[in-house]
């Protein structure tokens, strides 16, 4: 079930996000050629130069030098966690095991720490209550980005909590299985939120759509 | 006698008229259960194998036959297709059973046999063992039927089925509720080849005398008793307990409503060696009041439900799925159960709190819940069938060999790791390019005279000496601080030298309460006046030893240049200068030499093996392989998980080989209480870098005294990667820290999320005022 939902969500989101991205510069009719061209471009970019630039522009440079590693750590650990998790749950369709599992658990600790750091540093910028509600000047962050940020944080919270609960002898077998499911769907939610956040903020001057 | 012959003739005629008597007599109406849950009173006439009613007062009443006695109501042909009668094809890939193990300590043979060809076992027929041989070997713990009930056309000409009769299914062996039912009696009668009498003797309905094994091979049941021999070759006969019969010659069979556990345990007992009875743990199900047959059910076909996962598919018996551990305890929520409601017989649903689901996918329930706990030391167990338990009488039937250990964890037919018992085979084997074949113990013993029979030879000498009533004390052979004495089983018992200075050389003595004295005191054979007392003493000793094989030489006492021997029943003294020891010694005189009664090789052997469980030395194996080599072909000996053979220089070399691989079979009982299950103490009960569950090492066992023994870790049987499991175990050292870290992160994140979303909610709903 999760595989169907997961694949549908990922592919559907990719298409929707790509479409939204394209709509800023082109019409609906030119979407497919543009999409194929972008996919080719990503595939040709063997050194992921675009991704590196994006990380540099959005994660490293905007943050104070001492705190950059927090963002970098979160992004890298999240990428590896997502890759390992989705590999087993979506591609292989079996529970994670072996060295990958050990790496996943270890990176999970890194991710949770970095996520806390990021939230502590960035929470103010991504406050959900709108500036006009607070009677302040609107900041340079779109409402969609703010919501995506907090959806990502919420998913992260559920990921961390479910991982913790799986390690504690609290739940009976059926609840334990449910916790694993929660972990999976939270991961999917986090991946989708992160992807949407990245796409919405890609190459947009000042982070505004 | 005339009466008996007439009756036999009549019955033979009757037999000719109804050849298919077995099935023809069955009343089909009785084969279908009418729905009543009571057990009918079994007051029925006993029938002999000719289907004649038994009258207990007859002079030579025949034993009752279950084929004919039970047949009117129960279809014997259907029953004999059951699991216990070895007739049911068994898919060992799903669940191998305990093999039959042929143990012969003298030749160092521990040979696992199976009719179903499980890995590591040998099929009896492939080794040239006929059903007759098989029944003689293992009939003691067979239920009858199967190999014991071979049709006339399939009988081996060398067998004695006509004398012994067939070993029919022993229905009462399981179904008798009477405490008179005796398995020991069954085993005794089988060993005497009284196959057709075994059932009645075991049931307690009558007493059986005589031994078919002593009858000539030409005897058959029509010959009746032999009035000329009432001492030795006595024809087996049964004297029924007449009080068990009513006026219509009917007998009341106390049929147990449910077969009692003790009947099953007759053949299925497994106990840790050396444990005391009160220490043996009960199965938690038995303690809760369940019987074996509550789960291991069957119908008339006796296709016992074995209760393992996948049995439904393997046996095409869907009902079996409901009687697995998961079937009762998890029901429909189990992975593979199709139609079983959980909670059968009050089975509680396990919580399995905090155990990751992967454990339920990769481990069988029994891994954590059955058998002894997986400690550093492996438990050595004795089983009824392998170690001949449960047979009582004057002789001690039980044996320490074979050496069976548990638990090792092996993947079962369902791909799940489950606990198994393990046994290393020990055998002499002919290595052929095509198919290697083990040698049967008798084939080895034939060639092993003088090499393998060291202990019985010395025991024989000591036993012969002990027959002499004039010797005051127990004859012993002392050497290097040890004293060897013969026991009743024709073996040697070893004791430490009682007191005083131990003799370093071989020393024939008499053991008494005060110590060990020389069997022949020192004397001067050249004295002018002979010591007649000593000479008489020597004569008595030599007379005792006269029963030794004369081809090996004449027993003699040699001392200070004189040899004392018996010549045609009279003592004879001759000058003999070749052996002039300071102490009178026992020798074998040959034409041109005199050898000690016990050779250096024999002394080395008993000294090495004395008081040990091993029965062979490397020297014996090397000598035997040299004997085999002279016959041509390649031979080897398997023991301790290694295959031994002679290298080019004639020395013994050993290596791992498929023939030396252990055989294992799953265990499922006793099921431990939940509080004693594996993992109850937490993850680190298994997951540490040196846990017993994964890393405990087991040494192979065998009858050969050697340091070349195979050792393996538990992990190697599971087919798992050792470095990974060590690393994975190490991670559990830091896991508490990880939990603290995650908990802290969860608390912080949760607070921040609550705060952010709460503020938004508050402002959106107006509960929090906008700031200006």
Image: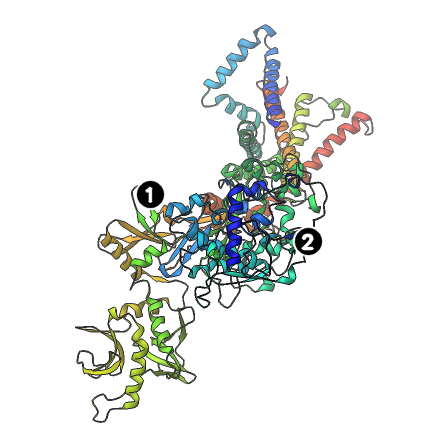
Residue B540, position in %: x, y? 32, 82
Asked if badge 2 and badge 1 are on a common chain, one would say yes
| Chain identity of mark 2 | B
**Residue position for label 2:** B289
SS at badge 1? loop
Query: Front-most of B143 and A177?
Result: B143
Circle on res. B435? 1
For residue A158, what is the image quadrant?
Answer: top right
Identify whether B763 is placed above or below B558.
Answer: above
- Is B6 positioned to the left or the right of B712 in the image? right
Q: Could you tell me if residue B634 is visible in this image?
A: yes
**Disc 2 crowd, CA 10 A, few/some/many (<14, 14-19, 20+):** few
Identify whether A100 is placed above or below B606.
Answer: above
Location of the C terminus of chain B by quadrant is top right
Q: Residue at x 55, y 56 (%)?
A: B63
**In whole angstroms, how far apart are the C-alphas of marks 2 and 1?**
50 Å
Residue B535, position in %: x, y? 28, 86
Residue B701, position in %: x, y? 41, 56
Query: Front-most of B513 and B421?
Result: B513
| Chain identity of mark 1 | B
Circle on res. B388? none
In this view, the residue farthest toward the bottom is B529
For residue B260, what is the image quadrant?
Answer: bottom right
- Is B675 positioned to the left or the right of B120 in the image? right
Q: Which residue is drawn at 35% across and 67% down?
A: B456
- Is B612 positioned to the left or the right of B254 in the image? left
**Disc 1 crowd, CA 10 A, few/some/many (<14, 14-19, 20+):** few
For residue B217, what is the image quadrant?
Answer: bottom left
SS at badge 2? loop
Q: Could you tell me if residue B691 is visible in this image?
A: no
Identify whether B554 is placed above or below B184.
Answer: below
Earlier-in-chain disc, 2 versus 1: 2
């Amino acid at each position: 079930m999760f595989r169907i939902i997961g694949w549908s969500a990922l592919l559907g989101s990719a298409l929707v996000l790509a479409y939204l991205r394209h709509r800023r510069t082109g019409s609906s009719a030119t979407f497919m050629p543009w999409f194929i061209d972008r996919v080719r471009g990503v595939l040709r970019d063997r050194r992921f130069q675009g991704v590196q630039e994006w990380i540099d522009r959005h994660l490293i440079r905007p943050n104070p030098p001492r705190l950059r590693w927090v963002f970098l750590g979160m992004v890298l650990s999240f990428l590896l966690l997502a890759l390992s998790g989705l590999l087993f749950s979506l591609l292989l369709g079996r529970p994670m095991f072996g060295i990958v599992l050990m790496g996943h658990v270890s990176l999970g600790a890194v991710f949770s720490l970095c996520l806390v750091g990021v939230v502590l540093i960035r929470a103010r910028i991504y406050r959900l209550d709108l500036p006009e509600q607070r009677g302040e000047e609107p900041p340079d962050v779109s409402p969609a980005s703010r919501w995506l940020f907090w959806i990502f944080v919420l998913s992260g919270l559920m990921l961390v909590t479910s991982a913790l609960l799986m390690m504690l002898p609290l739940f009976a077998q059926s609840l334990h299985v449910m916790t694993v499911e929660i972990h999976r769907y939270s991961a999917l939610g986090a991946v989708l939120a992160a992807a949407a956040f990245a796409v919405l903020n890609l190459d947009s001057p000042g982070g505004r759509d | 006698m005339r009466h008996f012959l007439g009756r036999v003739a009549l019955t033979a005629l009757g037999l000719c008229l109804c050849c298919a008597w077995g099935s023809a007599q069955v009343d089909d109406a009785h084969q279908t259960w009418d729905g009543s849950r009571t057990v009918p009173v079994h007051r029925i006439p006993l029938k002999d194998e000719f289907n004649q009613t038994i009258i207990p007062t007859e002079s030579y009443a025949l034993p009752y036959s279950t084929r004919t006695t039970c047949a009117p109501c129960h279809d014997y042909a259907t029953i004999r297709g059951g699991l216990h009668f070895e007739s049911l094809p068994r898919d060992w890939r799903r669940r191998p059973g305990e093999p039959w193990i042929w143990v012969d300590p003298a030749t160092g043979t521990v040979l696992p046999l199976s009719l179903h060809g499980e890995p590591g076992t040998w099929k009896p027929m492939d080794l040239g063992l006929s059903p007759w041989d098989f029944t003689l070997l293992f009939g003691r713990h067979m239920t009858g039927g199967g190999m014991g009930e071979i049709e006339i056309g399939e009988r081996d000409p060398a067998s004695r089925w006509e004398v012994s009769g067939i070993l029919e299914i022993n229905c009462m062996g399981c179904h008798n509720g009477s405490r008179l039912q005796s398995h020991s009696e069954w085993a005794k009668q089988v060993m005497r080849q009284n196959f057709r009498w075994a059932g009645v003797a075991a049931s307690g309905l009558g007493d059986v005398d005589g031994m078919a094994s002593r009858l000539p091979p030409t005897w058959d049941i029509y010959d009746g008793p032999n009035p000329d021999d009432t001492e030795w070759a006595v024809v087996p006969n049964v004297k029924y307990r007449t009080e068990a019969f009513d006026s219509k010659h009917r007998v009341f069979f106390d049929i147990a409503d449910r077969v009692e556990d003790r009947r099953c345990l007759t053949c299925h007992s497994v106990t840790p060696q050396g444990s005391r009875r009160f220490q043996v743990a009960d199965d938690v199900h038995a303690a809760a009041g369940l019987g074996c047959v509550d789960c291991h059910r069957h119908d008339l076909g006796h296709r016992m439900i074995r209760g393992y996962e996948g049995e439904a598919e393997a046996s095409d018996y869907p009902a079996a799925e409901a009687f697995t551990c998961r079937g009762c305890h998890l029901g429909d929520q189990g992975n593979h159960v199709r139609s079983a409601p959980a909670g059968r017989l009050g089975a509680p649903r396990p919580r399995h709190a905090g155990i990751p689901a992967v454990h339920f996918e990769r481990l069988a329930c029994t891994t954590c819940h059955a058998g002894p706990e997986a400690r550093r030391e492996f438990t050595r167990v004795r089983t009824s069938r392998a170690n001949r338990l449960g047979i009582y009488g004057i002789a001690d039937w039980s044996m320490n060999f074979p050496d069976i250990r548990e638990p090792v964890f092996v993947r079962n037919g369902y791909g799940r790791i489950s606990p198994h018992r393990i046994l290393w085979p020990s055998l002499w084997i002919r290595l052929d390019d095509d198919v290697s074949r083990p040698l049967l113990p008798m084939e080895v013993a034939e060639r092993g005279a003088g090499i393998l029979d060291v202990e019985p030879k010395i025991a024989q000498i000591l036993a012969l000496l002990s027959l002499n009533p004039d010797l005051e004390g127990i004859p012993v052979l002392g050497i290097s601080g040890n004293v060897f004495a013969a026991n009743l089983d024709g073996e040697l018992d070893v004791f430490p030298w009682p007191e005083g200075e131990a003799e370093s050389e071989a020393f024939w003595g008499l053991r008494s309460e005060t110590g060990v004295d020389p069997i022949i005191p020192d004397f001067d054979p050249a004295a002018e006046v002979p010591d007649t007392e000593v000479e008489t003493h020597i004569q008595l000793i030599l007379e005792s030893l006269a029963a030794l094989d004369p081809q090996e030489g004449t027993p003699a006492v040699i001392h200070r240049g004189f040899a004392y021997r018996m010549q045609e029943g009279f003592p004879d003294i001759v000058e003999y200068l070749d052996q002039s020891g300071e102490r009178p010694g026992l020798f074998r005189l040959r034409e041109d030499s005199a050898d000690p009664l016990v050779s250096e090789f024999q002394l080395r052997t008993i000294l090495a093996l004395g008081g040990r469980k091993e029965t062979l030395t490397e020297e014996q194996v090397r000598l035997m392989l040299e004997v085999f080599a002279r016959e041509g072909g390649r031979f080897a000996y398997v023991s301790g998980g290694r295959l031994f053979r002679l290298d080019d220089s004639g020395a013994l070399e050993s290596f791992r080989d498929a023939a030396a691989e252990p055989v294992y079979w799953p265990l499922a009982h006793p099921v431990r209480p939940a509080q004693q299950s594996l993992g109850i103490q937490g993850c680190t009960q298994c997951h540490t870098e040196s846990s017993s569950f994964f890393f405990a090492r087991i040494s192979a066992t065998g009858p050969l005294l050697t340091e070349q023994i195979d050792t393996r870790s538990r992990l190697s049987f599971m087919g798992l990667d050792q470095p990974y499991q060590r690393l994975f175990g190490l991670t559990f050292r830091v896991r508490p820290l990880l939990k603290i870290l995650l908990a802290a992160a969860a608390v912080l994140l949760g607070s921040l999320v609550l705060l952010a979303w709460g503020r938004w909610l508050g402002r959106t709903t107006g509960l929090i005022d906008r700031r200006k």
